[in-house]
Every structure is written in C-alpha cells, then in structure tokens.
Image (tube, grey):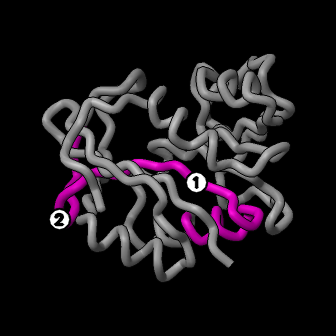
Amino acid sequence: MYSPPTQLYFEQALKLMIPHIPKMSLVLDISPKQGIYSREFSRCGFEVIAVQPPTEPLLDNPFVKEVVQKEVEDILFPYSSIGGIWARQSLNGLPKDHCKRRLSLFYDWLEKNGVLYFSLLEGEGFKWITEQSVTGLERKLVVYYSPQELDDILYDIGYEAIEAWRENKQDRNWLHVIARKNE
C-alpha cells in the first residue's frame, strides 16, 4: 500500500487530504507552529481550531477560529464533531501504546467519513537520542513503525487508509497516512 520513498512535501499532503474532508467541517491543526496549514484549510472554507501544547508561546493566527493551548489528551471535544485532523508529526516521540490511544482519541473526535493526516518514522523498535534544543540538551524518544504494524493499528481502531506513501527525508523514511473514519 505504501508507495516507494518520494519527496512529497507537506503542501502536497494538504492537496491530497483536503478533497477527503467533509464539506463545511471543522478542522483541527495539531501543534500548528507558524499556522501555515491553518491558513490553507481556512482558504479552502474550513473553520480551523489550532491545538498547541501549553509550553509553546500562544499562536497569533488570524486564520483560526480558536487556539486551544492544552495537551491533546486534556481536550474535550464532542464525539464525531471534527471533519479533519492535521496531526502531521504530533504522534512522533510517543510510546507505541500512547500513540494508539491518541489515534483512538482522534477517531472518537472525527465525524463519519472524517479524515486524519499524520506521519511516523519507518523502521523497527525505538531508541533514545540526545539533541540540542533552545533550552539545552534534550533526550527524545524515537519510535519506529513498519507499514504492516501501522496498517494493523489503523484497522483495529476502525480507520481506512485512503492515501499512504513513504518519504525519505534527512536519511530517514517517513510513513505518511491519510486515514478515514469508517463506521
């Protein structure tokens, strides 16, 4: 199902995702940084709610209806109220059981036929790395998934992968997925 590695950038992922989002839906932009993707969703006629961790400076983004500054698991959205979720890399660095719980939470938030976009690293196992950040050295968890493992997780939750591809970036293969909520 996953195409060979490509240089398919996030702007192209947007173009693949947007036609699948139910019309007149609410879209969540998880950890929006500069709000680039919020702007695109807004331009296409969707209302956007930006979600960012409380540790980040509050986003000033004129393209969003609201900014929710909480951890994802602390947010209470009504079930089946969201048409699309742009999670991009927000699942990276989570232990596998936590990632599965977050994917299930997203599934609960999505309306019927709502879609989710995310990307995860391809490989096996996990490792801890140390990287320089603005606050000093930081330990990060890097978790890898095989395409089959990811397909099994999505199927078990109830998603249907409608677009999936690999991207080679900085000597790492990323698995990109656009999945639809099936009911």
Please count the marks in the image: 2
Say what secondary structure mark 1 lies in: strand
Residue 15 x/y as whole percent: 53, 33
Residue at the spot 74% in from the left edge and 67% down from the top edge: 112
Residue 118 part of the magenta segment: yes
| For residue 15, side relative to residue 73 (left or right) | left
Q: Residue at x 77, y 40 (%)?
A: 68
> Relative to 169, is 183 on the left or the right?
right
Left/right placement of residue 70 relative to residue 89 reads right
The quarter of the picture where the C terminus appears is: bottom right
Q: Is residue 28 left or right of residue 36?
A: right
Q: Secondary structure at mark 2?
A: loop
Between 65 and 25, the residue placed more toward the observer is 25
Quadrant housing the N terminus: bottom left
| Circle 2: residue type | Glu
Q: Is residue 15 above or below residue 76?
A: above
Local crowd size for mark 1, using a 10 Å CA cut-off: few (<14), some (14–19), many (≥20): many
Which amino acid, mark 1?
Leu
What number is the disc on residue 116?
A: 1
Q: Nearer the viewer, mark 1 or mark 2?
A: 1
Furthest residue toward bottom: 156
Residue at position x 65%, y 24% from top?
A: 40
Q: Which residues are magenta?
A: 103-130
Within the magenta stretch, is there residue 34?
A: no
Q: Which residue is mark 2?
A: 124
Front residue (pair 113, 37): 113
Name the outermost residue toward the left.
171
The image position of residue 83, as x and y in percent, is 74, 52
Quadrant in the picture for residue 75: bottom right
171 or 128, which lies in front? Answer: 171
